[in-house]
Image (cartoon, grey):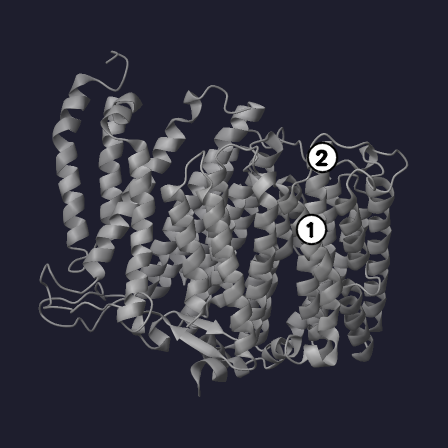
Amino acid sequence: MIVYILCFALFLVGIYGALTKRDLIKIILSIGIMGYAVNLMFILFAYKTGASFAILTKEGINTNMVDPLPQALILTSIVIELGITALLVTLAIRLFEKYKTFDITKIRRLSG
Amino acid sequence: MILPFLIIIPLLAAFLITLISGEKDNWAIVLSILAVISLLALSIFSFFTTGNDTFIYEMSGWKIPLTICLVQDAFSTFMLVIVNLIALTSLMFSVSYIKHYSGTWKYYALFMLMITGMNGVIATGDIFNLFVFMEIALFSAYALVAFGGKAEEYEAAFKYAIMGSISSTLILMGIGILYATTSTLTMANIAAILPTKDPRIMYWVGAIFLAGFGLKSAVMPFHAWLPDAHSSAPAPISAMLSGVLIKALGIYVIIRFFFNVLGAPQIFLTLFMILGSISIIVASYLALGQWDLKRLLAYSSISQIGFILLGLGIGTKLAILGAVFHIFNHAIFKSLLFYNSGSVEMALGTRDLRKMGNLKDAMPVTSTTSMIASLSVAGLPPFNGFFSKLIIIIAAVQASHVGYAIIAVIGSLLTLAYFMKVQRYGFRGNDIIEKPEVSISTGMKSAMIILAILCIVSSALIIPGIREVTLDPVVSVIMNKTGYIYEVLGR
Amino acid sequence: MKQTEGMTLIVKTVTRISVWMILLYGLYIILHGHISPGGGFAGGVIIALAFLNVMLAYGRGFIKRWVNIGFLHDIESSSAALFLAMGILGMAVGGGFLANFISHGKLFHLLSAGTIPILNIVIAAKVSMGLFVVVWTLSVFHLDKGGKK
């Protein structure tokens, strides 16, 4: 149980950072932390003490194995996060070109 | 067998555009227009052949619990028709609107990817697959919002991307909890297994999904990104975002998940009604104070989404009919209004209502179609918006939610008020505007005219004979609730 | 070549020797994707890292002369289109989209598992080129002075 609580704490760290930090790069990192917490949660759901990896071995089918599907799922979600992070970094660079700052409180041309 | 092509065709078009198109040739335009026309034809064909049936397409030859399935029923094909119809008009509008930007082929490739994502979300019956397609659609939406390359656009896109990422992470968390509980990702299987588990899990997952998809559909407490993103994007993209993206990724998934998977528990329906009425009133009030035309339209979108959610929350057959009809109507008139704002911005170079004037002589098509769209969104007969709002209000009264009915009436009066303001200052003001130096191309005009005609013609969907083949199958899919399980799994 | 471009001679020499080994390892991971852990994505990332190694050690200018970035873009898009083509082929020959329509062969042989090795190679091309082009695009940003106005 304690691992789930720690995993959720990591998620809260990410969401805290995304909502309170003023630096664009720190916000992007916080989004990443949130994503990692959820990925970790998937792996924890699939985890089984003492089980081994889920592939065929030359000795035959391995009966005591962890659930392989969440691993495939988080691989997909990692790729998506990679794409989103690259896009966010690109936008941050462009914003820096335009506003000459990474401070989100000074990037306020839109309002209302 | 049609459904996989609705995903394959735009995806193939996107990759072919990046492969063969360059700066100077028109391959990107030709390919994307061809792709979208075939998509529209396929989706209309599948809508009318589906009727009350449900067809399943299983990927890669495996059977259902092991594979990803695509579900073709009346509701999904109905949404596909809306998405591809608006996509076609948006492309027609884009061709000359986007000409002045550099690297236009990237625009068309991203546009095709966005359609892929939306079609995928609508077609799929697998909840993780839904997440992946949602991310494809959102990813291209972020990039398209920033396409113009101005400071405001980057700012809006950054805000949108941050909010979108937070909501996607929440949704992924919900999917994880669902998988841990039910050991399956097929939505029909989840629906079959979930009732046998602890009911608290259903409420937790429902709450997480409501927050996640509420952010996508910009319901009132989660709306902060929408006015920036939708007003900063290029006009055809605003039309796509406001017209279909928030519905395909937000409202459609909310209906699919809460009605067909969870079986519409009363607590969530009550939440829908509360969130919907907050959206209607507060967003209308905020729209009233806006002078930026596109920003006003963006707030109006939030308020109209509130109407849809209110209809869903009431939950009777009539109310769902109103909500489904309003999804269709809102897609049409809001896209049309964004095209109007785009052509005004192109001709006059401003979006500020105070700087516009009487456009009746200078831009007759824009001003006439904007009048039709405004009357339609404000809910005046005989335009389509009137009927869907009327149905929702009647349904609220019938279900003895008189308070919500009054809120809906006040909301439509406020809508009328702020569209009077648009017409009074923006299109029929005092100072006559001479011929603008930039003329509106035929493609843009015809996109506006098509949608304006649809604004009037689609009122006919409510006539009983036509309703039975168009809207009623959709309503029966939604009202069938967890009958979805039997339709999909065939047992 | 300017003296300032890239890193020191030591780094350049080590990179010149090691980059081929990295590429080879990436290829190994890709081709054994259906037998052992790994596959197209992991191998593709390794190949992209080999390219990035060259870029970091020798500088952007060298990469621009060494490979044609437009060609890498084309490889990326065409591999995605190829993946789709495999899917459609599965639809035409096998039971559904992306069906495994080639004979599965014997377990633990290099040439087995039907379409999976082919798809692994296609994915590897997509991932490696995509990842490298993304980092390349991010790295050239401050080269165009002040961005487009």
Near-viewer residue (C93 or A98): C93
Query: Measured along the vertical axis of the image, is residue B230 above or below residue A46?
Result: above
Asked which secondary structure carries label 1, the reply is helix
**Label disc, if present, on residue B448 of the rendered structure:** 1
In terms of sequence position, does the residue under pointer 1 or pointer 2 come before the other?
A: 2
Query: Measured along the vertical axis of the image, is residue B144 above or below residue B135?
Result: above
Asked if the residue at tag 2 contacts the one at tag 1, i.e. Cβ–Cβ closer than 8 Å, the answer is: no
Residue found at the very far front of the displayed protein:
B442
Q: Position of residue B400 (x, y in %)?
A: 82, 78
Q: Give the chain of mark 1.
A: B
Residue type, label 2 = Ala
Q: Quadrant of residue B456?
A: bottom right
Residue found at the very far bottom of the displayed protein:
B491
Q: Quadrant of the N terminus of chain B?
A: bottom left
Q: Position of residue C8 (x, y in %)?
A: 21, 17
Near-viewer residue (A48 or B295): B295
Q: CA distance from mark 1 to mark 2?
A: 15 Å
Residue type, label 1 = Met
Which residue in the structure is indicated by mark 2?
B347
Q: Quadrant of the C terminus of chain B?
A: bottom left
